[in-house]
Image: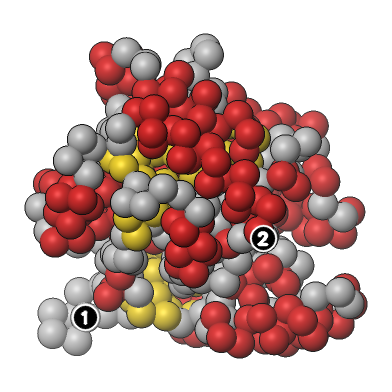
């Protein structure tokens, strides 16, 4: 294919693929990191951002995203490069993907109709997505048989060994076809190694958010959304988040007690924010119910869904507390204290939060705790030495830069 104006061959596209077709904090940031790293080496690179569905998330600081099916139809016979841009892609099944891509008002009806019927929900999900894959966010060479390279950057699969055999087999088959594969935690690396698949270990791409985008984030920190939180919390605040599955009354009561004690003891306000507005992510109504259980004036509802506003909220905070892995990672990038809180159903297993913290945090700093330990863990985190936190941030950024360098050279054909 040539450029009609110059008759010069057009550069082959780099298809940047991921779950940035829905509103989720980390996924939306992956596309930005990938874009910046590629353009550092090749400013005129032809980038196509693709997900399972066509979406326009630019109003929230994301990208315009094309549906993979349309991208594959156009470029099926071209020597494209396909980059999986990060995230817990190795364990997301078709049912989860389909529900998370639905309008929130429709998702609950589908969950009620199909949620308890595994065969029917699987068939519905594949029909809805228009794919046959059990793991639709893991793309092999079936979509682009003439691809120049198939790459995975810092993907996660901390619970892949717990998935059913057919699901695992599909994922492993696709990974074996990869030309470049890195994972973001040692647990995922060990699971793949046991299957004979070698993967480099690198931190999550969002590790670079402060290095790459600090000017933009500082600009958003001066905006109204963050300024309102600062005015309401003259002694500072904690950026706090929990997913919608914390929303039953008993769990909220436990969480409110911990946050109330933390705010009262530290003098810090509590700024609730959503790290994702897609189904099965965060629900502002849950925050309203949680705030109502706390002392009056302690909690502020931060309603912006712009990813740069969210980054700014965390960067300007005294620390992060929540169930979002990328809330933690942005806090890490800015050298902020951080604690992940586990949902009661997850307390007995090693999920992505624990796997990541155990891989990349310093000794004694891997704070991933049950609800009832939250206040004590957060107090310990707030007492951490600031210099040690900033040194850890710098070290992780250097580690990611070094780990991703072979991939970026491959992406731009160096």
Q: Nearer the viewer, mark 1 or mark 2?
A: 2
Where 27 sits versus 354, above or below? below
Q: Nearer the viewer, residue 377 or 266?
A: 266
Q: Residue at x 47, y 34 (%)?
A: 261
Q: Nearer the viewer, residue 116 or 303?
A: 303
Q: How far across and down, in percent of the image, does residue 283 sit?
A: 50, 67
Question: Which secondary structure, mark 2?
Answer: loop
The quarter holding residue 334 reads top left
Where 316 sits versus 124, above or below? above
Quarter holding the N terminus is bottom left
Residue bearing mark 1? 3
What's the coloring here? secondary structure
Side of 58 where 357 appears, left or right: right
Side of 34 where 125 appears, left or right: right
Q: Residue at x 38, y 56 (%)?
A: 273
Residue bearing mark 2? 248
Q: How far across and down, in percent of the image, does residue 366 sit?
A: 54, 23
Q: Residue at x 45, y 64 (%)?
A: 288
- Farthest-out residue, front: 296
Where 394 sits versus 233, above or below? above
């Amino acid at each position: 294919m040539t450029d009609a104006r110059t008759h010069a061959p057009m550069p082959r596209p780099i298809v940047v693929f991921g779950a940035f077709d829905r509103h989720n904090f980390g996924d939306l940031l992956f596309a930005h990191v990938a874009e910046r790293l590629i353009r550092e080496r090749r400013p005129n690179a032809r980038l196509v951002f693709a997900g399972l569905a066509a979406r326009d998330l630019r109003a929230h600081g994301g990208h315009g995203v094309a549906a993979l099916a349309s991208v594959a139809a156009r470029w099926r016979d071209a020597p494209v490069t396909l980059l999986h841009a990060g995230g817990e892609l190795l364990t997301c099944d078709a049912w989860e993907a389909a529900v998370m891509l639905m309008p929130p008002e429709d998702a609950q009806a589908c969950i009620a109709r199909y949620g308890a019927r595994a065969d029917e929900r699987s068939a519905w999900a594949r029909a809805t997505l228009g794919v046959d894959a059990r793991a639709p966010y893991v793309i092999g060479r079936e979509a682009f048989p003439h691809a120049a390279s198939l790459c995975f950057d810092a993907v996660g699969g901390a619970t892949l060994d717990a998935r059913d055999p057919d699901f695992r087999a599909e994922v492993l088959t696709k990974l074996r076809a990869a030309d470049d594969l890195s994972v973001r935690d040692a647990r995922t690396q060990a699971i793949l190694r046991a299957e004979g698949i070698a993967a480099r270990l690198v931190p999550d791409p969002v590790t670079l958010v402060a290095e790459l985008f600090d000017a933009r984030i500082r600009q958003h920190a001066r905006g109204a959304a963050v300024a309102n939180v600062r005015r309401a919390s003259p002694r500072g605040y904690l950026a706090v988040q929990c997913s919608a599955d914390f929303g039953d009354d008993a769990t909220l009561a436990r969480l409110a007690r911990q946050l109330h004690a933390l705010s009262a003891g530290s003098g810090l306000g509590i700024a609730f924010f959503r790290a994702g507005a897609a189904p099965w992510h965060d629900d502002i109504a849950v925050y309203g119910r949680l705030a109502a259980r706390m002392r009056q004036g302690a909690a502020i509802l931060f309603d912006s869904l712009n990813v740069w506003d969210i980054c700014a909220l965390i960067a300007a905070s005294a620390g992060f507390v929540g169930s979002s892995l990328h809330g933690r990672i942005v806090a890490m990038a800015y050298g902020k204290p951080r604690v992940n809180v586990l949902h009661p159903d997850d307390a007995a297993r090693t999920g992505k939060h624990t796997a990541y913290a155990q891989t990349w945090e310093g000794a004694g700093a891997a704070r991933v705790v049950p609800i009832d330990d939250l206040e004590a863990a957060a107090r310990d985190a707030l007492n951490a030495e600031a210099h040690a936190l900033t040194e850890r941030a710098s070290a992780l950024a250097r580690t990611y830069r070094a780990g991703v360098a072979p991939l970026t050279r491959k992406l731009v054909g160096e």
